[in-house]
Amino acid sequence: MSFRMVAKASRSRNRERLSPIFSAVTRSFSDVCSQSTPPSFGIAFDIDGVVLRGDIPIGGSPQALRRLYHTSGSLRVPYIFLTNGGGFRESTRARELSELLGVNVTPSQVVQGHSPFKQLVDRYKNELVVAVGKGEPAAVMSEYGFKNVLSIDDYASCFENIDPLAPYKKWTTKVTSKDRTTEEVLVPLRNNVHSQRVQAAFIISDSVDWSRDIQVIRNIYIYIYVHIFYLRSVINVLCDILRTGGLPGRDIGHQPQLYFAHDDLAYQAAFPSERLGLGAFRIALEAVFNRVHQHPLEYTCYGKPNPFVFKNAEILLEQLVSSLHHANAASHHFKTLYMIGDNPLVDIKGAKKAGHPWFSILTRTGVFKEKGNHPNFPADLVVDTVEEAVDYILKKEWAVYWFRVVRAKLFRIVRDADQINDMELFSLRSTILVLRLDYKELCDAIRARDALILFEELHDKLLDHESTLKHDDDSMSISSVTARLEEGV
């Protein structure tokens, strides 16, 4: 049996039958991806500096993300957004991303810096906790299941004169009604906060009023010399909470737990140069607290580059595959997970620390803008835009997938030669031809219709070519590591 036979059989077909055949071939890529076999790879995208700058899509992100969906709009490639940003509920962020990028993003695809706080609900479910940050921090925590949570704004309002600079602040902060505690709930809480200790403070996102918030957290630990160390509002309030053991204005007490959603020193926002992030706020709070308290500040940071975040992302991607393919998430394992980010100290460092199966890709559209790779935390691949990153991933991954599809067809033809009709043979030939230049040797042989190509021979060629590609990938990886070792990294 040869491809010459396939060609003759196809020419003997009625011309009217060729049109649906070629239509089927053009849809073959989507058909392959929609098969029941779950993909062996997934993607995690950072947001700021990778797909968005402020509210503006960058780097061809809408086009890149559309390639991860079927024409029907259903998800083809499992991916999530893995960002240290936050301040809003995952459902709210998913809706915003859907509108800005033109694709359907679900809440399960959004992992923010504070998303791991869900795992602390059992510990603090009914305890008094304070949520700090822009957006709707209290609403975020309430949705996670915390029953007794106040935003820093509402908490500070319960203490008269806790912020001595309040009369001089002329700005107004727009806070959604969903985040502000209703007056009916706030009245009894105002009575309780003076006797009920704050058990934990959660820094959800960037503080809007550093001076007040640091003062309040400090007072959750301070009584002596409070008037000397008033800074400016957020820092003030946080220090109050932390130093007094959760009761501002009281004697020094044991520090409540303090959790940061992440520790990014800088990030890429709409402004051309980097902006200071939550890590800068943590440095300021720690510096002030350690000056006014005999014991150093204790805290826990989540977010990238913590390897825990990447392990959690892997679990979420497996759950996403399970929902798409109705498979058991526990039985599915990724061969490669791609982290696409713009910050070497956060995205790339985190992927490297997480290890297999993570592959790091660094873009030049955010924090990182250099021509080469980062000297201290080099990525596995550096590209200009997220669109280039997605293009690289799909070419690499689907090449391997095509091999598997063609091999499966070849096995069936060899095994069930008598049951294979010429339509299926023509489809196989077209499937291999659609591989184009990536399989030039095979395509040239098929196009040379006077040369017989046995299916067994073609199968061997496919196996040899696949081994060559894998060897090339391994060689590139080894060369990259060797080069870094020679550089002393």
Image: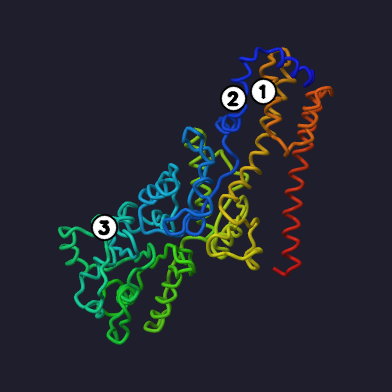
Image quadrant occupied by the N terminus: top right
Outermost residue toward the right in this view: 451
Three-letter code for the amino acid on which mark 2 is drawn: Ser
Neighbor class of circle 1 (other Cα within 10 Å; few <14, some 14-19, many 20+) is some
Q: Amino acid at mark 1?
A: Ser
User: Label 2, on which residue?
Assistant: 23
Residue matched to label 3:
176
What's the residue at 77%, 17% (across, down)?
Answer: 5
Q: Which residue position is annotated with label 1? A: 427
Q: Closer to the camera: disc 1 or disc 2?
A: 2
Q: Quadrant of residue 147?
A: bottom left
- Residue 83 seen from this side: no
Q: Secondary structure at mark 2?
A: helix
Residue occupying the point 61% across, 46% down: 391
x and y percent of residue 325 in the render?
Answer: 51, 33
Nearer the viewer's eye, disc 3 or disc 2? 2
